Amino acid sequence: MLLVALLASFLAFAGPASAVSWYFLRYYPASGQKFTSFSGQMTIPALPKAGVYYLWPGLQPTDNSGVYQNVLDGRSGTWWIGSGWCCSNPNLPWGSGFNTYANEKVTFENKLDSSGSTWTSTLTRQSTGEKVTDSFPLASKSFNQAIFAIELYDVNWDFGQLAFSNVVITSTGTDSSWCNTKPENYNSATTYSITGLSASVSSNTVTCKIDSVVLQKPA
């Protein structure tokens, strides 16, 4: 189960006594298909205080062994964003990143290379052009969950909405129905909006484009 897998992964960061609150939307591809890229732009919300705020888009594999993600991290009191695989099987060093601030836009791109052996993440801070790129040897993982998540430890959802735009998700196969299906809303916990959906199929690849995904507030 996703919640159990992610909670276990992040306890190393947040501490065993922490209370966690989850809000997330999750897309699945059609049966037998897997995701091959996930990109978009995140608008950075205000950070009210230092705390264990983890806001992220990410991909989860079929075995729920971890999560490959671009995490906006509020622990220091200034937002920092970086990419990585959490947290074991395999054990990989976290990628590089940078500080970012309220109302800035950060572009994320996660893509499986043509050989199928390596995933590459690129983050770009639009206000300055700062860019970081990291690669992760995750060939053994078959990603079948694309997630937009808010993960909070001993803090409330007190930063306003979390908005994603210009989202593009690709999968193998020819069945594009998943793109036009509402995502799972975990525990119906999130009030959200999605606009501008379109799907296309070419050369055994499904491309799902979404103009806007906004996690607005707790339901």
Image (cartoon, helix red, strand yellow):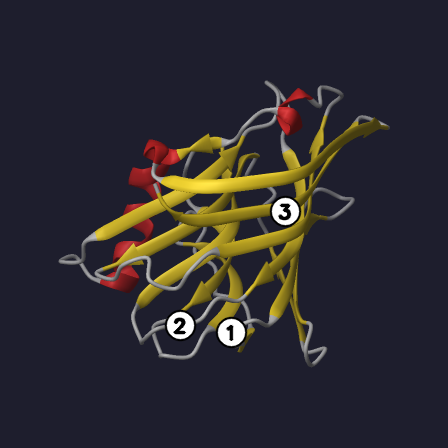
Query: Which residue matches tag 2?
Result: 47
Left of 215 or right of it: where is 33?
right
Task: Classify mark 3: helix, strand or loop.
Answer: strand
Query: Which residue matches tag 1?
Result: 102
Contact flag, marks 2 and 1 (Cβ < 8 Å)? yes
Q: Label 3 vs label 2: CA separation?
A: 22 Å
Q: Quadrant of residue 131?
A: bottom right
Residue type at the position of mark 2: Leu
Q: Kindly identify the residue that appears in the image at 61 percent across and 43 percent down.
A: 139
Q: Quadrant of residue 201?
A: top right
Question: Residue 77: where, in percent of width, then height?
Answer: 36, 79
Q: Earlier in the sequence, mark 1 or mark 3?
A: 1
The extreme left residue here reads: 17
Q: Label 1 vs label 3: CA separation?
A: 18 Å
Task: Classify mark 2: helix, strand or loop.
Answer: loop
Residue type at the position of mark 1: Ala
Q: Kindly identify the residue that appears in the image at 32 percent across and 33 percent down.
A: 187
Question: Residue 176: where, in percent of width, then height?
Answer: 71, 23
Residue type at the position of mark 3: Ser
Question: Residue 42: where, in percent of width, then height?
Answer: 59, 59
Q: Residues within 10 Å of mark 3 (few under 14, many from 20)?
A: some
Q: Nearer the viewer, residue 83 or 215?
A: 215
Q: Quadrant of the N terminus?
A: top left
Q: Label 2 vs label 1: CA separation?
A: 7 Å
Q: Looking at the rendered structure, which numbered label has been put on residue 212?
A: 3
